[in-house]
Image (spheres, rainbow, N blue to C red):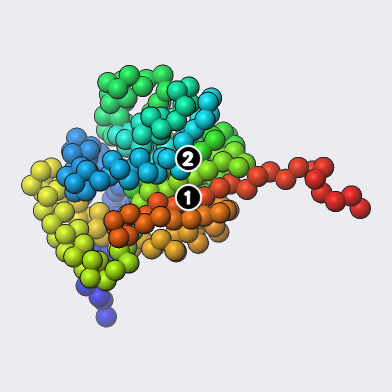
Amino acid sequence: MATPRSEPVSRLRSQFEEAGGKPTYVRQMFGRIARVYDFMNRLMTAGLDVRWRAFAVSKIALGPGQVGLDIGTGTGDLAIALAHASAPDARVIGVDFTPEMLDIGRAKVERLGLGDRVEMRQGDGERLDFADGTFDACCSAFVVRNLADLPQGFREMLRVVKPGGRVVCLEMSHPYDPIFGAAFHLYFDRIVPLMGKLFGRAFEAYSYLPTSVSAFPDAPALKSLMEVAGWTDVRYFYRVGGVVAVHTGTKPAAVSSDSSENR
């Protein structure tokens, strides 16, 4: 027997199939809401998303000459936050597969005078077009929930980061207090889609948001997925009672051949 929360998830899977798969559905959806994406983020979170990003990038701030990667950069807010938190000559590359979002992000980067520090490229987070060990750190915000293959996404992040490099993942999560959780879901499941319809004519997109969260692993389960992918020292930090969680991890340092025992 279907539960109230399983029915929207089932409908969403049908929408994925009709669109030709989850990646195509997600790309088209974000293309439609690109013009209202930043505004809706601030509105839905009362501006707290800015603080969440600042907290996330503080965990991987880049040193002089280092390069970071922002996966699913969208309109560039996390890449810009990482650039601001890092050394003046550090660089950030943001990748996203939605051209409409990248167009807005590139204009924002130029407007802020960060064109020499933040580069926006088209790319797929599950199949990154970079060599192994390219980056000193990797980050994402509200992205991994949209991946078709979550473990593959974390493996790709691990592959392109240098040994000893860091990852940070900012994502929606599940409130740990049941009373607060019930109030949050009333807002998130009912009010947010109406806000999307009122301000962006995007009821479907902002109905997708709470449905995708309901099917997403909680913070401890996401920690386990990252560890299985190969990340070590994985930790998570709740924000606002578990509405979001920030996960961090480290790529194991390379083992030198001359460090092994002589036999």
Contact check, label 1 and label 2, Cβ < 8 Å: yes
Instruction: Answer yes or no: is residue 52 visible.
Output: yes
Question: Toward the viewer: 176 or 196?
Answer: 176
Q: How many residues crowd around disc 1 within 10 Å: few (fewer than 14), some, or many (20 or more)?
A: many
For the N terminus, the quadrant is: bottom left
In the image, residue 176 sits, relative to residue 226, either above or below, namely below
Question: Toward the viewer: 154 or 176?
Answer: 176
Q: Would residue 221 appear left or right of 263 to someone viewing this image?
A: left
| Residue under the image location 40 percent in, 29 percent down | 83
In the structure shown, which secondary structural element does the residue marked by tag 1 occupy? strand
Q: Amino acid at mark 2?
A: Ile
Q: How many residues crowd around disc 2 within 10 Å: few (fewer than 14), some, or many (20 or more)?
A: many
Residue 60: mark: 2
Q: Measure the C-alpha gap from mark 1 to mark 2.
A: 9 Å
Q: Earlier in the sequence, mark 1 or mark 2?
A: 2
> How many numbered dots are placed on residues in this image?
2
In the structure shown, which secondary structural element does the residue marked by tag 2 occupy? loop
Residue 218: mark: none
Q: Picture coordinates of residue 115 (x, y %)? A: 37, 20
| Residue under the image location 49 percent in, 45 percent down | 167
Instruction: Answer yes or no: is residue 204 visible.
Output: no
| Residue under the image location 42 percent in, 40 percent down | 58
- Residue closest to the far left: 198
- Dividing the picture into quarters, in which one does residue 119 lie? top left
Residue position marked by numbered label 1 in the rendering: 248
